[in-house]
Amino acid sequence: MGLPADLLVGKKLRELRTRKGLSLRALAEQSGLNVNTLSLIENGKSSPSVSTLQQLAIALDVPITAFFEVERVEKRVVFTPADQRPQVLLGGVQMHNLAEDLRSSSIQPFIVTLEPGTGSGERMIVHTGVEFVYCLSGRLHYRVDGQEYALKPGDGLTFEAHLPHCWENQGEETAQILLILHPGDEREEELGQRHFLRSVVQKEVNMKIAVITEDGKTISQHFGRAPYYLVLTVENGQVVNREMREKLGHGRFGAEHHGHGEEHHHGAGHGLDSGSHRKHVSMAEAIADCQVLICGGMGMGAYDSMRRLNIQPIVTDLRSVDEAVQAYLAGNLTDHPERLH
């Protein structure tokens, strides 16, 4: 069965804090949380909220799923008895993983139990692939691409997951659903946990957003060619500072590319080799302190590299920097991975 969720999170928090060489007080200062709160979490005496985990993840510079990682043994067949389902309980949402440690991540099934009033938060969720929801009991309200869906027992809902969506139990009784995620990119590990735990980027958490631009006002359509990053500092959900930073372009990596980048070579796997990744790393050095990168166009290799660097890339069809940033802060900015080349 393993450790209960509270104890697992506390144990992992202590491990991560110790690995970073931080005292409780130092982590409290970096995260903005109370020392006593951190102590209670580490000792398994308090269950942290999603926003608390998000603050800790940012302070420790780790993905939020790091708090739930256990030693894995990959399997080709996974049998999950009803009374032995691996589970996580956060903020009234209980997740049971029905395929933990499955070697392939092409399908990820969960039983999700939601207490009345719980849901995904204010921010819309966007990811790759397809999402299937089947209501087992209670009632659940889903919003997908602006359309409202009220699910009752026996109802199913399937949609392309790049469409902005959110969900909430608006009823007075506990709801339970079967959730099956089919990522469009099998490299998206732990999509199920991110679906629930990283969907809410709390506005009270300080962050920096980088935007690819040529003039500081419009979003460039090509990541490789753009000469600048506009870096916006966000505090309490408001932009408090703007800074233009020079950005390396493909032409800066030598005549071997003839002024063009690997993003122009549209063969299978273009831009995904180690050499290309090193170039993308150099291009991202100027925004190493940013959590999000917004652009109008990008190659698959650059997109993959940003994710590996823990920078969330978002490809948007909006042209205005201000419009896109405000949409992101409101949870309404749609990522268009189908625009990758």
Image: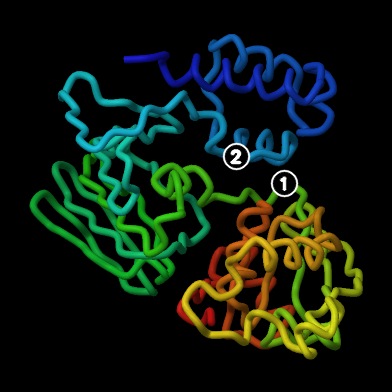
Left or right? Give the position of 258 relative to 50.
right
Pointer 1 with pointer 2, Cβ within 8 A: yes
The one nearer the camera, 253 or 150, is: 253
Identify whether 265 is placed above or below 186: below
Residue drawn at (54%, 32%) of the image: 49
Is label 1 in a helix, a strand or a loop?
loop
Left or right? Give the position of 182 relative to 304.
left
Q: Which mark is residue 73?
A: none
Kind of residue at badge 2: Ser
Left or right? Give the position of 268 relative to 138.
right
Q: Which residue is mark 1?
A: 205
Q: Which residue is mark 2?
A: 51
Is label 2 in a helix, a strand or a loop?
helix
Q: Residue furthest left?
A: 154
Numbered-mark total: 2
Would you say residue 263 is visible in this rendering? yes
Left or right? Give the position of 34 relative to 76.
right
The one nearer the camera, 303 or 174, is: 303
Q: Position of residue 326 (x, y in %)?
A: 67, 71
Kind of residue at badge 1: Val
Q: Position of residue 80 (x, y in %)?
A: 19, 28
Q: Position of residue 274 (x, y in %)?
A: 65, 61
Residue drawn at (79%, 53%) of the image: 235
Would you say residue 228 is visible in this rendering? no
- Location of the N terminus by quadrant is top left
